[in-house]
DNA sequence: CTGTGTGCAAACACTTTGCAGGTGT
DNA sequence: ACACCTGCAAAGTGTTTGCACACAG
């Protein structure tokens, strides 16, 4: 059983061609992907509505999560921490301003922030922009 | 001359009713605002297209900037640091999960991050989620 | 007076939904 | 066999554009 099939089974979703294709693509790329990129790859084989519905079921079941972005379009990425049920997605993303790749930096942890009193922090996300190793 | 009029003049934009209204609203609220919120307030007096065009000219001239958000809609906020020409918007935003307000925390600075080698950092943005003083 | 801004309507892009037929388990 | 998934087409939203008129400088 492939890794994609495993993921689907773990999240109680049926194995279908679109789902396997999309998931494999996310697993291969290992970075966040925008709707337009996904459509470019999947729209030949599948209907657009199906792509959107697949994204929806993936985010609802916790396989993917929406990624913070200053770009126009919505982006999604594999959800590592969500596997365990807790939804502590303290993600650090790095967006390369040259090639446009948006990577999830798992090994970088978000530093503590000094919040003014009165604020209760639940979640923190960070978006770094600059040049990735390939482009610098 | 009002503060809004000053801002417009500084950015070489003509003073018109929509612009003054929108800008005053941003100055009063002093937090980021979503397109729908702006439309709620301005759509009675002005055309939707005008609101979008106003947002466009404001972002292009550097008065506003798009704000990072996990919400569905686009949000904008006044651009403080951009005044000086440099575009170092190292913003920390706090999104209240209860009331939905998205504030720009100017007094909180983004902590240094330990990036893997090869990455060149240009800009950093942070989105904190939780409860604001009013809601906690 | 001149060029820019605005309203209106239409166009456009993106996303969702209803339904009938197809597929996974 | 049954529930769920998919394709198709249509409907919704959100955003942009063309054009004629209005207004700021």
Image (tube, coloured by chain):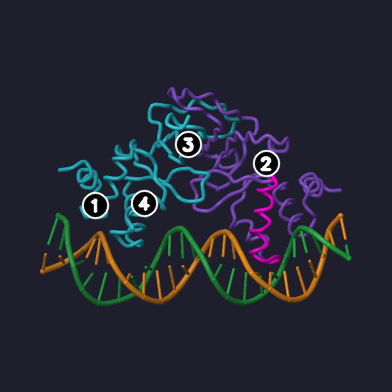
Chain colours: A purple, B cyan, C orange, D green
Asked if badges 3 and 4 are on one and the same chain, I answer: yes
Q: On the same chain: label 4 and label 2?
A: no
Is residue B81 toward the left or the right of residue A61 in the image? left
Q: Nearer the viewer, mark 4 or mark 2?
A: 4
Residue under the point 49% across and 38% down: B98
Question: Marks 1 and 4: which is nearer the front?
Answer: 4
For marks 3 and 2, give the one nearer the viewer. 3
The residue that disc 2 covers is A79
Q: Is residue A61 above or below residue C24?
A: above
Dot 3 or dot 1, earlier in sequence: 1
Choose the circle earlier in sequence order: 1 or 4. Answer: 1
Q: Position of residue A116 (x, y in %)?
A: 43, 24
Q: CA distance from mark 2 to mark 1?
A: 44 Å
Q: Are marks 3 and 2 on the same chain?
A: no
Give the residue at x 49% y 32%.
B131
Pointers 1 and 4 within a single chain: yes
User: Numbered disc 1: what chain?
Assistant: B
Residue at the spot of label 4: B38
How far apart are the alpha carbons under marks 4 and 2?
A: 33 Å
Give whichever of B134, B121 is nearer the camera: B134
Residue A63's x, y, as percent? 70, 45
What residue would you read off at disc 3?
A: B96
What residue does disc 1 label?
Answer: B13
Q: Is residue B68 visible?
A: yes
Where residue C18 sits: x, y (%)?
A: 64, 69
Mark 1 is surrounded, within 10 Å at the Cα level, by few (under 14), some (14 to 19) or many (20 or more) other residues, namely some
């Amino acid at each position: 059983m492939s890794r994609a099939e495993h993921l689907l089974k773990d999240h109680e979703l049926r194995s279908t061609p679109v789902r396997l294709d999309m998931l494999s693509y996310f697993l291969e790329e290992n970075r966040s992907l925008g709707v337009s990129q996904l459509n470019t790859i999947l729209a030949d084989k599948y209907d657009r509505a199906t792509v959107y519905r697949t994204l929806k079921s993936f985010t609802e079941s916790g396989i993917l999560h929406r990624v913070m972005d200053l770009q126009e379009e919505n982006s999604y990425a594999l959800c590592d921490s969500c596997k365990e049920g807790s939804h502590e997605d303290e993600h650090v993303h790095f967006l390369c301003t040259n090639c446009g790749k948006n990577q999830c930096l798992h090994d970088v942890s978000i530093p503590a922030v000094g919040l003014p009193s009165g604020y209760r922090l639940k979640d923190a996300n960070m978006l770094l922009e600059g040049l990735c190793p390939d482009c610098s």
